Amino acid sequence: MFNKTEGFATMIIGEFCDVFPPETDGVGMVVKSYAEELTKMNQHCYYVAPKAPNCTAVHSFPTFQYLSIGLNGSTYRAGIPQIDISFRKKIKKIDFDILHAHSPFSAGREAMRIAKKRNIPLVGTFHTKYYDDFYKATKSKLISNTCIKYVLEFYNACDEVWAVNHATADVLREYGFKKEIRVMPNGTNLWHPTEEAIKAVSEKYNISEEEHLFLFVGQQNWKKNIRNILHAVQIYATENQNFKMIFAGKGPDEEEIKELAKELGLRKKVIFTGHITDRNLLMSLYARADLLVFPSPYDNAPMVVREAAAAGTPSILLKDSCSAEGITHGYNGFLCENTPKSIADCIVDALPYAKQVGEKARETIPLPWNVVVQNALSRYRELVGK
């Protein structure tokens, strides 16, 4: 138990998330990194999330998983901790000092319930443009705004709210949140894949040494602007054939995306890898790529941009998007407008400078996870000390 007098004793921390490895998205990777780093710092950190099917992985940190049900057409699962008696009994025995929720839904609500019952601090991190998701699912502004009220109810109940960058904090304020928001960025550790690992990637995906490689990593979901990426690749291919475009990930629109690639005549140029769970393979893929093409208007502070930078690969991002915070065009990344032609033109303009811009991206973008989590731990202690 945390000693408020000494202030540096071991803490018992709960990190709550709506996804669990191996079914992780960017937020899941953040929570996994928090749990790993806090454990390295000799803290007792529990990863709490809905039960993932076929999960046999062993982690360095303890976990709690509760009952969940699949959501039709989605890789996500709806957690139902309120009826999981076994989970309730087990977690009741843990004498938490502080809880940190990375979602306002089942995981966040469970964290809120426990924090309120035990009178301990609750931190909530805002990661995602939830309104966009609600509107895509319902096509109703009324329903979407009602759902945003549900989201705000959660964050208003937190003792402190964090956002992953300033632009993301602005999104939450646009939703109507009035309290203070603390910016707590995500981290990424530098990665230097071997030449053999990079060569193995080329062989695995049949990419010749002379071919340029463009990469997208993330959910196969139209909201990520994949339609414009494919049309941009089609434009680029009219005058350039010495390249491949890889889409790494899975998602609800995967089959439609593959169909569009076929309709655009890109079957020989576009490769779909599915979800890559092998970390070394993914980072080697980043390192092999000339550019990460990620003009998503949806994402806030995407991990993929930091991961690419950690491997020395620059990103193409939308000008004035949340993702573009901290990016200077032509210095540590490239910015484009939200049209297929602008994306295609940006690829052409960026290629001659990709290597040197990638080195600046490596120098300026990644923030080591141990630094990020040490800052978070210091803040946890301050909140508990109050």
Image (cartoon, helix red, strand yellow):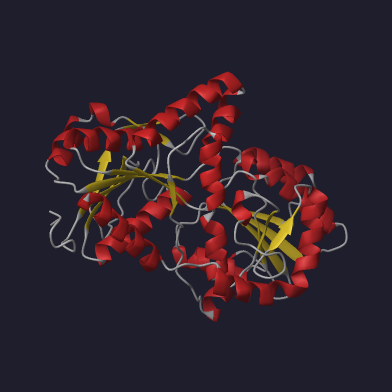
**Closer to the camera in the image, 364 or 196:** 364
Residue at the far bottom in the pictured view: 195
Counting labels gives 0
Residue drawn 25% across and 66% down? 41
Residue 53 in percent (x, y) is at 35, 41
**Closer to the camera in the image, 196 or 119:** 119
Question: Is residue 140 something that shows in the picture?
Answer: no
Q: Is residue 386 left or right of residue 245?
A: left
Residue 154 in percent (x, y) is at 38, 33
Residue drawn 55% across and 32% down? 131
Whether residue 190 is situated above or below residue 71 in the rendered picture:
below
Q: Is residue 336 left or right of residue 87?
A: right
Residue at the far right in the pictured view: 239
Residue drawn 87% across and 57% down? 238
Q: Is residue 209 left or right of residue 204?
A: right
Whether residue 153 is situated above or below residue 28 in the rendered picture:
above
**Closer to the camera in the image, 383 or 343:** 383
Question: Is residue 40 something that shows in the picture?
Answer: yes
Whether residue 137 is situated above or below residue 92 in the rendered picture:
above
Whether residue 239 is situated above or below residue 73 in the rendered picture:
below
Residue 21 in percent (x, y) is at 37, 50
Residue 294 in percent (x, y) is at 65, 54
Residue drawn 23% across and 34% down? 116
